[in-house]
Image (spheres, grey):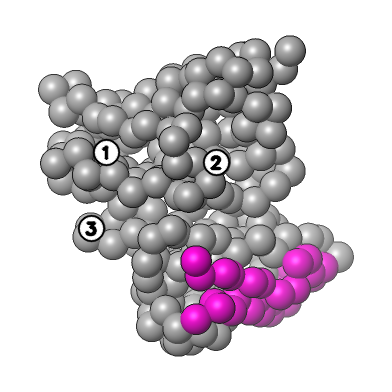
């Protein structure tokens, strides 16, 4: 069965970077796009960007341009999201999500990785 | 960017009620709309895509309709497990955007 398993919770200081991993199983990572979505405590869902694991193409939300990098390692079926220059308002639950087919509907979600930014 | 709005922001309902949630896009998105259900502490779950197609395994009491800019999620015969927050999402173009959510609470 399809699963996306993310790395564990992180605590970072303001200005630091964090890299979250997302390992896919039950399918080949190269077959479907991966997006990253975050959710601040008690808030809604915010799309951060997308990567095509088959060719490495990316599309980042404007609000994260210059601070985020999404990559994949197809040899291990793992996607990564690195966010730099962390601020307190980056404290959130970060989800990797799989696109359904060739659409931007999200049919499988990782369990989420809590990133806490605090001095 | 396409802005998504939802109404109401919250609704109180009883078991067996019918609940209707509305989602509006700031510009036409054809049928490129999905609905998700999220329970506290859990990842969202895809309920409906292309505005009206039920995801595999989702109960038939959930239905979606609409196209262009106005969409509706209807939950018939509300069940205890349906109390959650519901989000719409447009998949027409990048950046992908979500509505602010509608919380369905127990009356």
Q: Mark 2 lies on which chain?
A: A
Q: Which chain carries label 1?
A: A
- Give neighbour class at mark 2: few <14, some 14-19, many 20+ (Cα, 10 Å): many
Residue identified by numbered label 1: A1
Checking the image for residue B41, the label placed there is none
* Mark 2 and mark 1: Cα distance apart in space: 24 Å
Residue identified by numbered label 3: A101
Taking the magenta stretch, the answer to whether it contains residue B23 is yes
- Give neighbour class at mark 1: few <14, some 14-19, many 20+ (Cα, 10 Å): few
Residue A9: % across, % down: 56, 18
Q: Which picture quadrant has residue B92?
A: bottom left
Please, what secondary structure does the residue beneath circle 3 have?
loop
In this view, the residue in front, A44 or B55, is: A44
Magenta-tinted stretch? B1-27
Q: Do labels 2 and 1 share a chain?
A: yes
Checking the image for residue A38, the label placed there is 2
* Mark 1 and mark 3: Cα distance apart in space: 16 Å
Residue depicted at 39% across the width and 60% down the height = B94
- Which badge, 2 or 1, comes first in the chain's sequence? 1
Residue depicted at 22% across the width and 60% down the height = A102
């Amino acid at each position: 069965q399809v699963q996306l398993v993310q790395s564990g919770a992180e605590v970072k200081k303001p200005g630091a970077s964090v890299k979250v991993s997302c390992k896919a199983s039950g399918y080949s990572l190269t077959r479907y796009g991966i997006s990253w979505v975050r959710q601040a405590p008690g808030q809604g869902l915010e799309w951060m960007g997308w990567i095509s694991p088959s060719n490495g193409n990316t599309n980042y939300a404007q609000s994260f341009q210059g601070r985020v990098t999404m990559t994949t390692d197809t040899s291990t079926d793992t996607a990564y999201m690195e966010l730099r220059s962390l601020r307190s308002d980056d404290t959130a639950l970060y989800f990797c999500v799989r696109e359904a087919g060739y659409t931007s509907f999200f049919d499988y979600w990782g369990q989420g990785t809590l990133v806490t930014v605090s001095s | 960017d396409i802005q998504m709005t939802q109404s109401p922001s919250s609704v109180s309902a009883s078991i067996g009620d019918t609940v209707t949630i509305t989602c509006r896009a700031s510009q036409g998105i054809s049928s490129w709309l999905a609905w998700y259900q999220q329970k506290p502490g859990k990842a969202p779950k895809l309920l409906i895509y292309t505005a009206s197609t039920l995801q595999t395994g989702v109960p038939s009491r959930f239905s979606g309709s609409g196209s262009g800019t106005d969409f509706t999620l209807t939950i018939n015969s509300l069940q205890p497990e349906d109390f959650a927050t519901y989000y719409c999402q447009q998949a027409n173009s990048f950046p992908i955007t979500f509505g602010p959510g509608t919380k369905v609470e127990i009356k």
